[in-house]
Image (cartoon, rainbow, N blue to C red):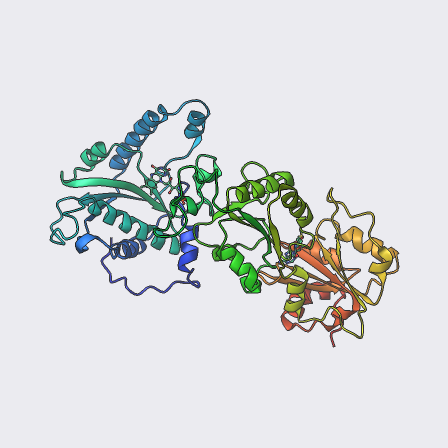
Amino acid sequence: MTSRNSDHFEPKQAAPTLEQLIRWRRDVRRFKTDPVPDALIDRLLRLADLAPSVGNSQPWRILNVKDAGVRAAIVRNFETERQKSAEVYGGEEASLYNKLKLAGFDAAPVHLAIFCDRDAAQGGGLGRQTMPETLDSSCACMVTTLWLAAREAGLGLGWVSIVAPSTVAATLGVPESWKFIGYLLLGWPEEEHLDPELERYGWQSRTPFETRYSELGSADPAPSANAQSAPAQAGSVALVGAGPGDPELLTIKALKALQSADAVLYDDLVAKPILAYVRPGAKLIDVGKRGYRKSCKQPDINAEIIRLARQGLKVVRLKSGDPLIFGRAGEEIVACQEAGVPIEVVAGVTSAQGAAASLKVALTNRDHARRLQFITAHDRRGHLPSDIDWGAVADTSATTVVYMPKRTLAELTEVAISHGLDPKTPAIAVANATRPDEQIFISSVGAIAAALDAAHPEGPVLIMIGEALRHATAHDAAGHASSIAAALGALPVTT
Ligand SMILES: Cc1cc2nc3c(=O)[nH]c(=O)nc-3n(C[C@H](O)[C@H](O)[C@H](O)COP(=O)(O)O)c2cc1C
Ligand SMILES: C[S@@+](CC[C@H](N)C(=O)[O-])C[C@H]1O[C@@H](n2cnc3c(N)ncnc32)[C@H](O)[C@@H]1O
């Protein structure tokens, strides 16, 4: 460990906000084996050392355990205690407990044993004569600070308590006055998650903030043990548009809904930085295809929204873009209405608007467009819908925005051309509109499918078609497109 002065630290990227750090901080049990530079560990521990402590006693004692033999003894201690603890559980709970990964000793490069010196003279006993346990609380403040500082540096921390404290103390040979606080594992996380591992594995979810908060002196009675089953207030649902990605495109109403929500159910397509605006303490539920534990089927989502609202919670159903545009909002609205749960809709900026703004192109340019139409290239089974009005798509005075085009674009353009759409009509694909990884591909109807296939962009894509797009003036867009256009001879003339 170095002892360099580490007060001056220049983060390489824009620093995350405190709120983002708090939200991303996870208890990490899956680490990469890559080493952590000594200077970084030094810096983090010195930051943690600035934590508040009773009487300024700084009672924490930190042992950086590097010895392989000692580490192995701690792992044996953990295994014994883990098995003993498993005996407390029965049936399904026992089998779930046994499946949980409760530590990451194997890969974590840094092991820290944390103790509290109950005899710490520093602080002159201030504050702890009435409450001696404030020494332990001070150590927990130190660990929390370390947790957040580690997260800011991209590191993860796992707190292990499934070890016998007396055995740890004996293994490490620490003074008798040192009380064991926890064994911390530190390293580069293998995965990033917005929700706790125990929640994902179905052991324990977070519960509503309201069940832990009460106001003294308010007219309302304090929450009772059965507050959840008998809410004082009826819950409600807001179907909120998250916009295409840039959080600054949230409406003020959407922001207010996020900041007062008790539970937010969000889709895969909702850009993750938007979740940083959700009220701290709100339950965050990923109902996207990859994240939802049980299922992400629409009826299950409807049922969950209603269940939470009936607990008296303010539920936000957060959808990308505008909830009423290709968002299956109708089904959720009807489900709430049928269940007697009040529902409101907060409009959002649809992705077509975000993409048009990025391109600086008027979709209804009066010299070219008499109509603006949004179509989907994706039916219930993922096929090109059979009932598209092809005459309307071929109309030279229309601008068409195609949502969900990725799988069927070649077929769509082919059929449109066969219905009279000029293959030279400008066509622009925008991937990840308004997000930092936005990509723009300028092409023509005849060439756009091949261009997109060649580029194979990750993330959501939409296609814009029509003469109005000749006025796409974004120079960066032209830059992105030039290689494709040169290969395909398809760059529309911009005026
Ligand atoms: C005092 C303390 C002791 C903990 N002990 C363990 C442990 O022994 N094993 C484990 O897997 N997680 C342990 N955890 C992590 C918690 O399970 C975890 O923080 C919680 O599930 C919330 O998840 P999050 O930290 O990702 O938000 C501990 C956390 C704290 C604060
Ligand atoms: C299920 S629809 C949801 C549309 C959303 N309600 C809206 O108003 O934008 C998903 C499609 O929206 C489009 N989309 C959503 N966000 C996008 C973005 N940031 N960039 C480009 N296309 C996007 C893509 O065509 C994607 O396949």
Q: Tell me, yes or no, if residue 318 can be seen here.
A: no
User: Would you place residue 221 above or below residue 351 in this image?
Assistant: above
Describe residue 269's horizontal placement relative to residue 76 as left or right.
right
Q: Nearer the viewer, residue 436 or 307?
A: 307
Which quadrant holds the C terminus?
bottom right
Image location of residue 460, percent across then percent down:
64, 54
| Picture residue at 33% right of the left edge, 63% below the top | 9
Q: Position of residue 221 (x, y in %)?
A: 39, 46
Q: Is residue 130 left or right of residue 303?
A: left
- Dividing the image into four quarters, tell me where ligand 1 lies: top left
Number of numbered callouts drawn: 0
The correct choice, above or below, for 8 with respect to 296 in the image is below
Direction from residue 101 to residue 458 in the image, left or right: right
Where in the figure is residue 198, as x and y percent of width and height? 43, 38
Identity of the residue drawn at 76% across and 73% down: 365
Which residue lies most toward the front here?
219
Residue 410 placement (x, y as % from top left): 77, 52
In the image, 402 versus 451, the foreground residue is 402
Quadrant assignment, res 364: bottom right
Task: Name the residue located 72 percent from the left edge and 65 percent from the top edge.
Answer: 485
Query: Is residue 394 visible from the viewing direction of this image?
Result: yes
